[in-house]
Image (cartoon, rainbow, N blue to C red):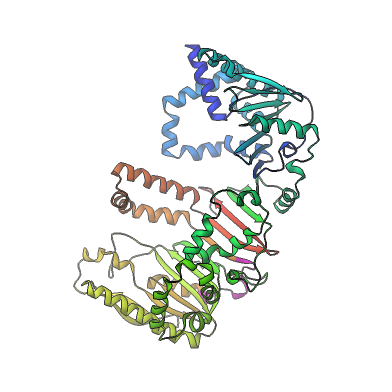
Amino acid sequence: MMARVKRSIFTSLITILILPAANVCGAGEELPSATEWIPAEAAIVLEIPDSSKVVEGLLSKEFEGRIRENEQIRQFLESPQFAQIVGIVRYLEFRLGTDWKDAVRKLFGGRITAALLPRNQVLIVVDTKSAELLSKLHQVLLEHARDEAQKAGDPDRVASGVYKGWTGWTFDGGKNVHALVGSRLLLSNKADLLRSAADLAETGGAGSLARVAAYQQAQAALPQNAWVRAFVNIGLIKEAPRSDRIERAMRTNPLLALMVADNLEALSNATWMAAAINVDGGRVGLHVVADGTFPGGDHPTAFSLPTNESGCLRNIEVPRRLVAVSLYRDLARFYRQKDVLFPERTSGLIFFENMMGVFFTGRHFSEEVLPHLHPEIRLVVAAQEYQPDYGVPAVALPAMALVFRMKDPKQFVPMAEEAWQKALGLINFTRGQQALPGLILDRAEYRGVRYTVAAFSTVGLTPEDRKDVRFNFRPVLAPVGEYLVLSSTEQLARDIIDYLQQEDQNAARLPGRHFVLETDREGLLKLLKTNREAIIRQNMVERGHSREKAEAETNNLFALVAILGELRVELLRQEDKPQARIEVALPGTEN
């Protein structure tokens, strides 16, 4: 019985800790930075400078309380499988002479570095806080590995060898190797890579990653107090197969080109990219920077490049807001470059241009319409509060609105109004061909703003009739000073009018930013909950899943939103270099 328990203990431990091998030597020496033992050709490097911050967070009662709120985790903690893990932990505490939390702090509370090199070579370096405890753990694992190898009739799969004073071990016949150097554990899937680390240690780090100029520049560009750091050698990544997949997608997708063409251009001439992760007050922040430079003013992708003084506007804040996006995009300039940016879609845009010509009475779309708009564009998505006298649809769709900034409202508003009414007329004509109700246009006023609104007739309809999906819509075109609001509902349009009339113009600008996105977790979860049954049915119809499978995927969607639902993303240029800042509020920590 004890033998079976020991086999289960060590099999689980090796799987959990990802320790396929181990060894001992050089105790008591002060070790240099792990990057001095990593070859210079490392393509991707991940570093946790002080893992104790992460460890203490994971061991805290607060974190334990949060994970116990998850139903699936709570069920696992009550399962026989977890009871077996508890038994494993108790056994290890006995063998190592310490409780499990102290062991975790000592073994994983130092610096952890992982590197990916060409030909799928991996090197992981774990700096523990106790060479003695590391040695004890290795001895326990070694005993187990030898015992299992003997039972499998393959004792030679556990072997060791010495190279330049390091003893390397393998527990699986050489597929994975490792070595212990004092309090440091090195693991690799290639014995040659472990030997390279020993060579670098002998030369004092000459020729290592730590001496690479790009790596040094990347470290200097990142916040010094980062919990996690990452370095990417873009030159090596570019050579990887299928690395141009995003660029090919951009050439066929105008929306993708509008969003990321400038950043891809900057990354195309970059030699490195780096990222840092910080945790502060329950908020996780990611800061990404690269050494590439944005294109000049005459480049096709320069349509989204604000100066250090200009930039997109702050996101609009309205009640029940779910998602807000603010962009800096010169639409006229973007559209003029369509043949260069997405040549494979040029022919498909002919129909679009013809339609725009009809809506705008023959005016050239990129030369006579889009130039009337400033680069600042804002999008708002908000949940709706339905009015029973209009309709309470069975499927609740969020309201959406686009807000443009006009250069000459007196000249452009009449053009936009005419195009708007023609577009609604086309919608009504199409719906009429299908014997569906059409929209009725009207004029209304709110806070001194005259706007056009369209709504579906409710004459003679029963409450059941008013559950139709069309009652999610009551579109509005509203000019508000220098802004033009195009909203799917009158309610959201009025909320935006309230905001714009009180907005501080001086504080609205976000210098250097060309993309800002914000989301609201509670609002998104509430919307999903309202439409849960509709989401499940749609999953079953479109993907052919059973109800059980559809419910599981819907639960996964809820879990994802619960984790990432409170999000802020900024794309910006700083000293002509591309940067991104992403912040996620952990559940229960929103301000």
- Near-viewer residue (182 or 161): 161
Query: Which of the 4 quarters of the picture holds residue 123?
Result: top right
Residue 450 visible, this orientation: no
The location of residue 128, given as percent across then percent down, is 69, 30
Q: Is residue 511 magenta?
A: yes
Q: Is residue 351 left or right of residue 394?
A: right
Rendered residue at 18%/72% (across/down): 460
Rendered residue at 23%/74% (across/down): 433
Q: Which residues are magenta?
A: 500-513
- Near-viewer residue (558 or 449): 558
Q: Is residue 203 above or below residue 431?
A: above
Q: Is residue 407 magenta?
A: no
Rendered residue at 62%/58% (across/down): 267
Q: Is residue 139 above or below residue 293?
A: above
- Near-viewer residue (427 or 523): 427
Rendered residue at 49%/68% (across/down): 343
Q: Quadrant of the C terminus?
A: bottom right
The location of residue 463, given as percent across then percent down, is 22, 65
